Image: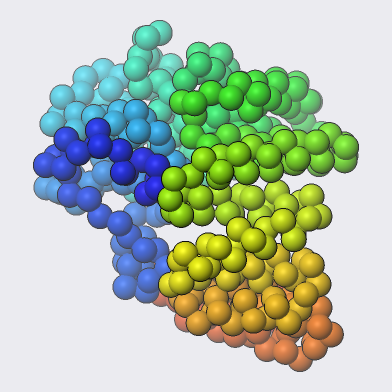
Amino acid sequence: MRAFVFTDKTLGRRAGQFVWLSIDTEKAGNAAFTRKFPVEGLPTFFVLDSATETPVLKWLGGATVPQMQKLLDDARRTVAAGNRGVDETLARADRVFGEGRNAEAARLYREALNAAPRAWPRYGRALESLLSTLDATKDAEGCARMARDGFVRLKSTPSAANVAASGLGCALSMKPDNPARRELLDALRADALSVVRSKRSDVAADDVSSVFQALEQDREDAKDAAGRRSLLEEHASFLEQRASRAKKPEERAVFDSHRLGAYLDLGQPERAIPMLQLSEKDFPADYNPPARLAVAYNAMKKRDEAAEASDRALAKAYGPRRIGILQVRSDIEAGRGDAASSRRYLEEALRTAEALPDGQRSDRTIASLKKKLGS
């Protein structure tokens, strides 16, 4: 978003309409904010009413410039109390979604979508938000059905990628013995494939990459190793092409995480080394490049290089992100055959997790670490 969206000059006219804030969720001083405004994933965007300090809109995930313009228009309309009928229902859904009341938000988003006229301009945003709430409330079948039914209306819009990826991911989360699972998978797989093969310029590259990831998970679920590998190669090629078009380091580094994931899944972690070394050079204060290098080197069984990269990352990392880096370091030490050091890094990860303030502390992470330690 910083590299491709917020630099767009057309957003300049918004300067006097909003106060723009960026919250680093890794910093302990921001835990009170994340406790009040739950963040299920990054990026998450909130628009807050300055009079009440309550959310009027929440958006989970990235957005294109036109999508962001529409989000801001919707937020201003809500604050101005200009909503009626279905738009009022959508505004209520946005508010409770922003407060983290996902089940209530899902009900209201459904109500708005069911009452909306055919040409309702906020259909795509409302459906994407509904899918987020259904996923959060573990309603996998409801999420898959809504995505399948809504894709037809959205296939020519930027929402197509998120709807296809979310829907296919939800269908894969359904229980294997659910009789509707196969039909939904077939329909949503076809939708997802249509997105990645369309090569449209109005869909964000990271959204297309997420569709590739859902399709790869689908092939893994089907035990189709050859099909999955073919998709991974296509995915890696897509990311490399987009990275090659970058005009500045920030744009190129956007693709590092997804490229690393594709290379790891292909069993070719060495392909990630040059790009990550370049990113570490370009962004010396960022813990992400060395943290990713540690993962890549460890997959290559180059334990010394992995440990050195891990040390560089740990020297810069803070907050919840430090826990994952410590777990990778534990894996590196296990690969070296040093069980005592491996356990020591896991214990440090557990202490870090338990010391985090409310808003950053994750009981699930703590339980997982205790399980690994056998405690």
Q: Nearer the viewer, residue 279 or 144?
A: 279
Residue that extends furthest to the bottom in the rendered view of this protein: 340
Residue 99 located left or right of residue 239: left
Residue 312 drawn at (x, y percent): 55, 79
**80 up-or-down from 103: above or below:** above
**3 up-or-down from 238: above or below:** below
Residue 375 drawn at (x, y percent): 71, 82
Q: Residue at x 58, y 24 (%)?
A: 199
Q: Which residue is drawn at 29% across and 31% down?
A: 69
**155 up-or-down from 141: above or below:** above
Residue that extends furthest to the top in the rendered view of this protein: 118
Q: Which residue is drawn at 68% across and 39% down?
A: 237
Q: In which quarter of the image is residue 98?
A: top left
Q: Which residue is drawn at 55% across and 29% down?
A: 161
Residue 316 located left or right of residue 196: left
Q: Nearer the viewer, residue 233 or 168?
A: 233
Look at the image and tell me whether residue 289 can be seen: yes
Q: Quadrant of residue 123?
A: top left
